[in-house]
Amino acid sequence: MHGWMGKILRVNLSDGGINEEALDPQVARDFIGGRGLAIYFMLKEVDPNCDALGKENKLIMTTGPLTGTKAPTGGRYMVTTKSPLTNAITCSNSGGNFPAELKRSGYDVIIVEGRAAEPVYLWIDDGKAELRPAGHLWGKNTHETDDAIRAETDNKTKTAVIGPAGEKLVLFASIMNDRDRAAGRAGVGAVMGAKKLKGVAVRGTKKVSMASEERFKEMNQKYRGQFKAVKKTGPYPLTTHGTAITVVATQTHGVFPTRNFQTGQFEEWEAIYGEALTEKYLVKAKPCFSCPIACGRVTKVPDGPFQGEGEGPEYETVYALGSDVGVGDLAALTKANYLCNELGLDTISMGSAIACAMELYEKGHLTESDIGFPLAWGDGEALVKLTHQTGMREGFGDILAEGSLRMATHYGHSEFAMVSKGLDLPGYDPRGTQGLGLNYATSPIGASHMRGDLPYCELLGVPVKIDGLTWDDKPPIVVKWQNVFSLIDAAGLCVFFSIRYLCDPTLEIRPEGIMDLLNAATGADYALDELEKIGDRILNAERLFLLRAGFDRRQDSLPARFTNTPMPDGPAKGVVCHLDEMLEKYYQIRGWSQDGLPTEDKLKDLGLDGM
Amino acid sequence: MKVHVQLYVNLKKYAPADDSAFEIQLESGARIKTLLEILKIPSSEERIVLVNGHHSDDLSSLKAGDTVTLFSPLSGG
């Protein structure tokens, strides 16, 4: 095979069995990789009603045909499992260098099953895999673990590991690769911890075979050239300031979630956005594998109570650990970000849980005696303290570790949990980004911005700018974008490059560049229609898992704050998210019943009728 | 009439003075395109245009007291 390595590594932690299997070429063609191959194996092998933290659940790591190649941003992988936070399917994407190394160690797919009796880590050395004891690593943070594994394997080893949060089953624990890149969402780290798997370490020096080296080089130069041409016209904001520059767009549109989404504008935004970060704490920009953008931030808070160094914050973190908790102290939120990376926590759900606790406290449903100290909006010291407590499950952190929805329900006020399907909302208020509201409600993993990210067009002007306040026009765009985003995640690419340079610059975002690169790499001769259908297939396959896990239309929802309470001020003042109106049309376009079930004809058309 | 202007990211360099948030005097009913001409923002400079935080374009008319926000397209969050 070209593009694919053609191999699956299956690791059974219960009996220590490690086996190689061949990747079926037809399955590879139909599901591509990443999210696609992962949901194929999840549907085939995992009972959607299993205990997410039990030995029946599996943890699947997948690369795509373009992972580990010279394709621009060809450095992504996906971690897929049943989520302990939401009980839905989850797949969490990450970049860095680990994904390319994993692919080049010889595998497209790693399936981890069962549960080890004692802590272990998986060491894959260029196609030779073994389980090694990890008792001595248990309790170490992600950086210490990476250091220790590299010291006992090879200094060039790349790791994806959990910290104390994953070990202690914090329900939104992340898997951190390359120390500071996160497969963050919905508790993939807790699943790893429940399996007593401390991490996966890889060395990979194999070459990814190309169907046509010449054609691949030509296409690579073509699409990189388009990026270079734009970069020549002026500083590229993502490179200069990182993703935190996005605050400009959310704040000015009035959708920058502030104090648990009570409003959409944060008065201290200029203290925490990308330019402030560049000016105060940026050490250098850091690219992931094969990425020409380099939006990653190596930063250092040189002195003061929040002194530290590491990577971040990204936009989502600036929202979650900044405006959403009312913190305008960039040092405090950056320190909390460092702690999340080291302890292995999703910054979005961490911030969202603390924001929820702050609102419960403000409204008198949570008291100082519950927490151990006062919890006012904007308290950076409390933010850092609670982040640490959560990662270690100490004090009130043990409650926060259950996530915002379980915590708010425990205190009798689930309405203050800003979640969809149990997953905390990213940093865009859906009252001013109506299409994203539909994205949140219909994303198979719960509220994710990475399942057809409408803010690109509703806020950021990529590929074109449209009005975020309208809703009638959004369902067909959301369907189209969700399908293309599934494809990006399957190919092994990053959305940041793909959406702007590998898709046609209209709302149709036809993935011409992805097709060119995939065809040159794999020789599969995909047509555009076929690729778009694969995106559709992946999303529908994820929907099937979700339905079998007991979800239905009722969970395609948003908190009442967005659908019933008009935005109190700012540019979106007086607006609610018109979710119900959009859902009806969305189901029709998807070929689903009004109960949100894919019809038999639809499943047959996608080749999912037998699954 | 007076309107408020806020320039961000790569558009900051077109501010007439140091402050990238400023007031400017325009003829009553002026359109965004007139403002862009006055600020010498070339058509090749990609930008997002908001008036009072709302989606707008070069042909939108302005009223006294409006706030015009201009920033570069961004591609990631």
Image: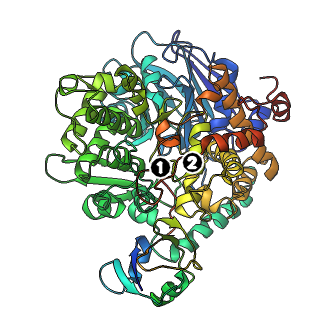
Marks 2 and 1: in contact by CB < 8 Å?
A: yes
What residue is shown at x 73% (from left), y 60% (from top)? A214
Specify whether disc 1 shares its chain with disc 2.
yes
Return the x and y of residue A528 as percentages of the image width and height.
79, 52
Q: Locate the N terminus of chain B by quadrant.
A: bottom left
Q: Quadrant of residue A164?
A: top left
Return the x and y of residue B13 as percentages of the image width and height.
39, 81
Q: Residues within 10 Å of mark 1 (few under 14, many from 20)?
A: many
The reply, left or right, for residue A34 in relation to residue A126 is right
Report the Cα–Cα distance between label 1 and label 2. Answer: 8 Å
The reply, left or right, for residue A82 in relation to residue A588 is left
Q: Could you tell me which secondary element the residue under label 1 belongs to?
A: loop
The reply, left or right, for residue B42 in relation to residue A5 is left
| Marker disc for residue A203 | none
Q: Which residue is mark 2?
A: A436
Q: Earlier in the sequence, mark 1 or mark 2?
A: 1
The amino acid type of the residue labelled 2 equals Leu
Asked whether residue A283 is in view, the answer is yes
| Marker disc for residue A428 | 1
The amino acid type of the residue labelled 1 equals Tyr
